[in-house]
Image (cartoon, grey):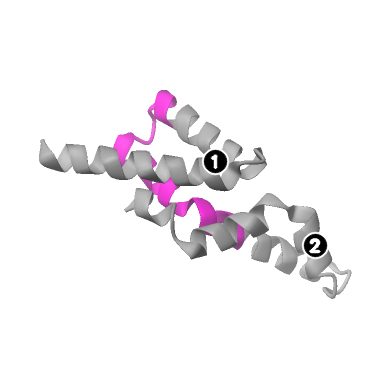
Amino acid sequence: MAGVYQWLPWKHACLARCRSPIAFLQQHGGVPPTAAGAARLGAMHGLYCVGCCWAQMLLLFVFGVMNPLWIAALTLLVLLEKLAPAGLWIARVAGLGAVVAGVALLVR
């Protein structure tokens, strides 16, 4: 499921908004300059960031929530997706790898 999600348009739309907080702020500049307006804008941006990474976060339950190796690996993947110039392609390759690994587990 997490591998397929990496290829969906919704993932890519969320990733595009999460990757560029400045562009997000510029697009939503009409928010009132109050604490409530800032909280609303932060929550909106946070939802996009969760939208692009929720399936990877759920993988922590599969691999073990307290497994430092998997926590580090998934953190690195999310970081590369967000910051690397080829983040979209990194997400797609990771998705393909997750699908292949899932099918291999089912076959076994």
Question: Is tag 2's residue or tag 1's residue first in the polypeptide sequence?
Answer: 2
Look at the picture and state if 36 lies above or below 62: below
The amino acid beneath tag 1 is Val
Tell me the residue at 15%/43% (across/down): 106
Report which quarter residue 45 is drawn in.
Answer: bottom right
Residue 78 disc label: 1
Label 1 secondary element:
helix
Q: Main secondary structure of the magenta part?
A: helix
Residue 25 percent coordinates (x, y): 80, 62
Report the span colored magenta.
Answer: 47-70
Residue with the mark numbered 2: 25
Answer with left or right where residue 80 lies relative to residue 66: right
Residue beneath the point at 67% across and 50% down: 19
Who's the residue at 80% across and 55% down the image? 22
| In the rendered image, the vertical position of residue 6 relative to residue 47, given as above or below | above
Q: Residues within 10 Å of mark 1 (few under 14, many from 20)?
A: many
Mark 2: which amino acid?
Leu
